[in-house]
């Protein structure tokens, strides 16, 4: 790996660690530079603004997560299963997801849009399944986006209050119960 | 993940044959079934409009917000940045 790539990777890794403990808003570029072992100004050679560093960090984690969510939810025709998959797939990203849902509303709106758009590949399966169930009259009639708001509202609540609620300690049974409840709430 | 082709317009992973435009050469086609046909990508305005509808459906965005986000997404896509898709 060339030196420049190595330095960039080192900065990115330090930023991920700093943002994990201090958050995207409070994590400072001075701390990141110190942890990466580079001069403060060096950071801005690779990432012109702190926002660029935040974007890179988010995509470093969100990219693989979005990919997994998309590939595992594809071809699934049961909303309960999709919800369970979602809860299962975000578990390894628990710390990151928790930080993201807490800090995202305070980050620039173009960054918020990018993050939401990244999750579209998952959401489309979610909405499609609901529409198909509605066509079969197995789900009540409502705008599918309301179900999506409810689901993400629920998940973001669990991850905003992750420490308080002990979300990381949720068992497979807890995740199944949540998903099952959600499906029943939509059913006729 | 690294080997998976993603659409140069919307970023959708193109994993299955049905993710590609029907009849296209999958080795040389970089856009998904939603963003073009085997003959090429849809025009810029159609892609922005389609993306707006997609965001309204998948993110529950209001129409005006979806339009802004869609334009931003397409403008920042590989397709536009590489010059393969011309802005109108």
Image (cartoon, rainbow, N blue to C red):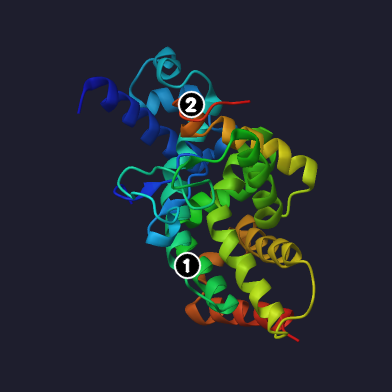
Q: Is residue A100 left or right of residue A40?
A: right
Residue in front for this viewpoint, A115 or A46: A115
Which quadrant, please, contains the C terminus of chain A?
A: bottom right
Residue that appears at 55% across and 76% down: A175
Q: Position of residue A165 (x, y in %)?
A: 62, 66
Q: Residue furthest top?
A: A41
Q: Which residue is mark 1?
A: A74
Which quadrant, please, contains the N terminus of chain A?
A: top left
Q: Position of residue A147 (x, y in %)?
A: 72, 68
Residue that appears at 28% across and 25% down: A5
Residue in front for this viewpoint, B5 or A79: B5
Q: Residues within 10 Å of mark 2 (few under 14, many from 20)?
A: some
Tell which subunit mark 1 falls on.
Answer: A
Q: Is residue A45 left or right of residue A160?
A: left
Tag 1–tag 2 contact (CB < 8 Å): no
Residue A38, quarter of picture: top left
Q: Which residue is mark 2?
A: B81
Q: Residues within 10 Å of mark 1 (few under 14, many from 20)?
A: some
Q: Is residue A170 above or below residue B7?
A: below
Q: Position of residue A52 (x, y in %)?
A: 51, 27
Residue that appears at 66% across and 49% down: B55
Number of numbered tags placed on the structure image: 2
Label 1, label 2: how far apart the Cα atoms are: 29 Å
Residue in front for this viewpoint, B39 or B13: B39
């Amino acid at each position: 790996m060339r030196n420049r790539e190595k330095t960039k990777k080192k900065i990115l890794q330090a930023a991920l660690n700093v943002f994990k403990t201090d958050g995207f808003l409070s994590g400072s570029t001075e701390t990141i530079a110190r942890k990466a072992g580079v001069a403060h100004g060096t950071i801005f050679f690779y990432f012109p603004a702190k926002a660029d560093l935040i974007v890179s960090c988010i995509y470093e984690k969100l990219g693989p997560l979005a990919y997994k969510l998309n590939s595992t939810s594809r071809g699934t025709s049961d909303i309960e299963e999709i919800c369970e998959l979602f809860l299962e797939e975000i578990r390894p990203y628990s710390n990151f997801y928790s930080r993201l849902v807490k800090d995202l509303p305070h980050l620039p709106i173009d960054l918020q849009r990018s993050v939401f758009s990244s999750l579209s590949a998952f959401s489309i399966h979610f909405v499609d399944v609901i529409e198909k169930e509605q066509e079969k009259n197995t789900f009540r009639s409502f705008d599918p986006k309301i179900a999506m708001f409810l689901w993400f509202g629920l998940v973001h609540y669990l991850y905003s209050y992750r420490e308080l609620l002990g979300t990381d300690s949720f068992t497979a049974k807890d995740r199944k119960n949540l998903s099952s409840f959600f499906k029943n709430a939509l059913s006729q | 993940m690294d080997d998976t082709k993603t659409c140069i317009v919307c970023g959708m992973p193109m994993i299955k044959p049905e993710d590609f435009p029907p009849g296209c050469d999958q080795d040389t086609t970089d856009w998904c079934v939603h963003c073009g046909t085997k003959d090429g990508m849809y025009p810029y305005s159609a892609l922005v409009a389609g993306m707006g509808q997609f965001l309204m459906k998948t993110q529950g965005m209001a129409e005006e917000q979806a339009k802004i986000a869609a334009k931003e997404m397409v403008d920042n896509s590989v397709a536009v940045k590489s010059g393969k898709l011309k802005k109108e």
